[in-house]
Image (tube, rainbow, N blue to C red):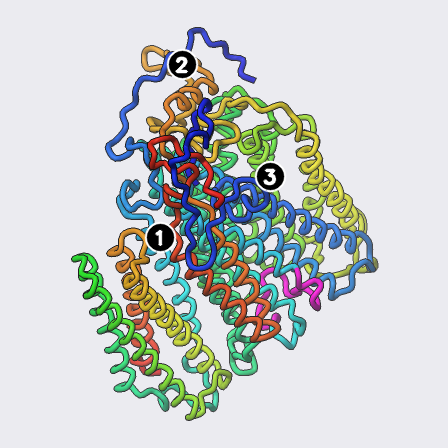
Amino acid sequence: MAIIERPTDTPALAGAGAAVVTPSSSYGYFRRPVQTTGWRSWVFTVDHKKIGIMYGVVAMVFFFIGGFEALLIRAQLAQADGTILSADKYNQMFTMHATTMVFLFVMPMAAAFANYMMPLQIGARDVAFPRLNALSLWTFVFGGIFINTSWILGGAADGGWFMYAPNSSVPFSPTNGVDFWTLGLLMTGVASQVGAVNLIVTALNMRAPGMTLMRMPIFTWMALVVQFLLLFAIPVITVALFLLLFQRNFDATFFSVADGADPLLWQHLFWLFGHPEVYILVLPSFGIISEVLPTFSRKPLFGYPFVVFSGAAIGLVGFGVWAHHMFAAGLGPISVAVFSVATMAIAVPTGVKIINWTLTMWGGKLWFSTAMLFAVGLIVQFTIGGLSGVTHAVAPSDTQQTDTYYIVAHFHYVIFGGAVLGLFSGMYYWWPKVFGRMLSEKWGRWNFWLMIIGMNLTFGPMHIIGLQGQPRRMYLWTENRAGEGFFNLGFWNLVSSIGSLILGIGAVLFLVNVWVSRKNPPAPADPWDARSLEWITTNPPKEHNFDRIPTVHALDEFFHRKYEDVGEDGKHDYKKVRTGEEVVEIEEANAEAHIHLPSPSYWPIILSFGMFIICYGVIYSTLLLAAGAAIAILALFGWALEPPTADDSEFEPPSSDGGQPSKELAHV
Amino acid sequence: MSDTTIEQPATPEPEMEIPAGYDDGQDHIGLPHHTTTGLSNTKLAMWLFLGSECLLFGGLISTYMLYRNRQGDAIGPDQLWDIPFTSATSFILLMSSLTMVLAVSAAKRKDERGTRLWLTVTALLGGLFLAGQVYEFTVFYREGLGYTTSLFSSSFYTLTGFHGVHVAVGIIMLLSLVGMLAKGRVLGDKAETVEMIGLYWHFVDVVWIVIFTLVYLIPA
């Protein structure tokens, strides 16, 4: 859609009788969508900002669904011999809790931030392939819906999030749940894969003039590393998912142990994906807090190149440690030793990051906004999780901990304490950027403290429960084996369940905060005295992001436009010479004309919908499958025949008369 | 929050130096030039996609290599392979890479007729390979190698089947491109569109070389 500053004194259509408005062209089947308001402007949009917001909203919905499932699990375990869930429902509950949180909350929420912020941080007007971006979104949405419809269609998957085969074969899991899970994850895999290609090309190819790789904002760097991890990890789980699908639906024999199948095949394929996945979850949050900490410490990020390269190193080594999830599987001493050492090695770049964050804060003028609190919370909580992680790297100790609640404690400290706290930090930090209003700091503090207290009460006791030997994924525990005194399982299970309730309330306070902050006055252009490029535009950004593509001169470009170095004798002393508002005003005064943005399209959502139908077809009927395939093929051809950007003559009024074209496509 | 007072009125920003190619007032989405790396977006995206495809086939090939000798009492690879026949179809597929190169070369010369001709020939050769694969599968099936017969059969059919689907998708793309070229419906740089499909096609051929070597040529 073209966006041009329409001259305010000229009525758009008055006197333009000579101008010929052509209707938006028809490409194959439909005319191009033209709405700029209402639901159609969202559903058919290719604007990375709207797509980012929708990613975030849908991920948030899944966060609360997954959280509700967690509360049911904790309610079941609060007392001995719990009766809230049956064994079968309990299996489904923990499987879907993990699947929802990993694939339908953390990954898409990170994608939301990457989608929204990456083009802004590198000075681009959109991603490289806007329609593919919309395809990613809708494929994820339909995939998430697809998996969750299994609840009402015979029961959800029940094999745990790593769905070990042959335990997930038909004899052990006869409902369609695992098929829903497999197909749904294939869909979200398509979404991640397409998104990865798109965002890598964006970061490598669409940078503003002067934006070298080592001037890229750190969040964009971490998001870029994550996209590479996705690019190479998703195909591996795709193979595993296809094998399982063929095993269950076409009687293939990959996991039939009776025929001589190797049960480790699934484990290797899954964890070769699964371990990079851990970094896929946490690196975006590392990126977010690497933006937040310098801003609220009033200092540049300590050792920016170290943070960049340790992030890349984590990504690289992350592909070489997968077998530490399988120490108890009998790999043999050599493999175990190698993977044990590699796992300890990956703690080094992670430690480097923690040192960098700490030294960023050291000596800074700290401002404990809610975003900063979440960022500091991440450093502390993630470090606790990292330390228990090192105890897993020691293989003999891991053998003791495998499949106990100690593992559950560990990965909740790294994923909730790492990934989720970072994402919330990003929410508070970028909320004024995205929505033009600040979130309430008062409610933010309640949000933060209840979540921190809640998470420590929930997951802290799990260390004790686990080392006492309570296995994970058991739907009940009995009083006569609970032990006594300090190590009594009953006491700590109750603490954990109460903690989960506090955590749940803390999370709901975020929604409360969004609600009470909805009528806050418009946020200032630069509420946090921020540093990176996304702030060199209005809040929220205009549809074309930047009135003029900024030319980048330094890392922390926005900071250097506001501050001048007045230090002498080689000492740095930065003095504020203009405000963020003024920087934005300068950009507005130098606005470019003739900015064409990619036009909205029907095809991404139709193609995703076709895949959605195909997935039901695989489970229920070949006829449905054929119908879905037909929709998808039609969409593919419609897509190929449609130009990404509408022609000049399709805008109203057309630009051919020399006047300024309007921002709207012709409604003819 | 900004408590820093501004001592002097903000001066207009000095005119900044903008590298050539950026200050034409146009945005650069979808255009092949003016990218940071110099590679066009589509080409970079295709390379990335093919990079991830390596991992897809890597996983399938690993599965096959793990199970290649696990056929139990059922029929095994040594009783099945017809090396001369598969060599012939492999040769046909490799030749299709040559015709693909000729198509790209014709497209770069803006020789529309030649482009369409060589694209069609490439699609035909691909179709011939696919026909050979279907024939081969039929023969194997008649000799007792069903999809569910053994670990070996499942992993063999899955691996070669995935490759066959890739070839089929390639053929559909080639023929669609021929049609779109004939009707003048290809958007943007035609030579580059041909080259993109060429990259995909060559990749599928290269994967076949690996599969042919590992599956057929190395004795079980």
On the rendered image, what quadrant is the C terminus of chain B found in? bottom left
Residue A308 seen:
yes
Q: Is residue A526 left or right of residue B110?
A: right
Is residue A572 positioned above or below A165 on the image?
A: above
Residue B23 percent coordinates (x, y): 29, 31
Q: From the image, give the main secondary structure of the stretch colored magenta.
A: loop
**Which residue is painted at 24% across and 78% down in the image?**
B91
Q: Earlier in the sequence, mark 2 or mark 3?
A: 3
Residue lying farthest to the top in this orientation = B7
User: Which residue is the site of mark 1?
Assistant: B45
Disc 3 packing (10 Å; few <14; some 14–19; many ≥20): many
Residue at mark 2: chain: A
Residue lying farthest to the left in this orientation = B109
- Mark 3 vs mark 1, foreground winner is 1
Q: Cα distance, mark 2 to mark 3?
A: 33 Å
**Which residue is painted at 34% across and 78% down in the image?**
B130
Label 2 sits on a secondary structure element that is: loop
User: Which residue is the site of mark 2?
Assistant: A573
Is residue B79 positioned above or below A580 on the image?
A: below
User: In terms of depth relative to the viewer, which is nearer, A347 or A57?
Assistant: A57
Q: Determine if marks 2 and 3 fall on one subunit.
A: yes
Residue at mark 1: chain: B
Label 3 sits on a secondary structure element that is: helix
Label 1 sits on a secondary structure element that is: helix
Q: Which residues are magenta?
A: A149-168
Q: Is residue A158 magenta?
A: yes
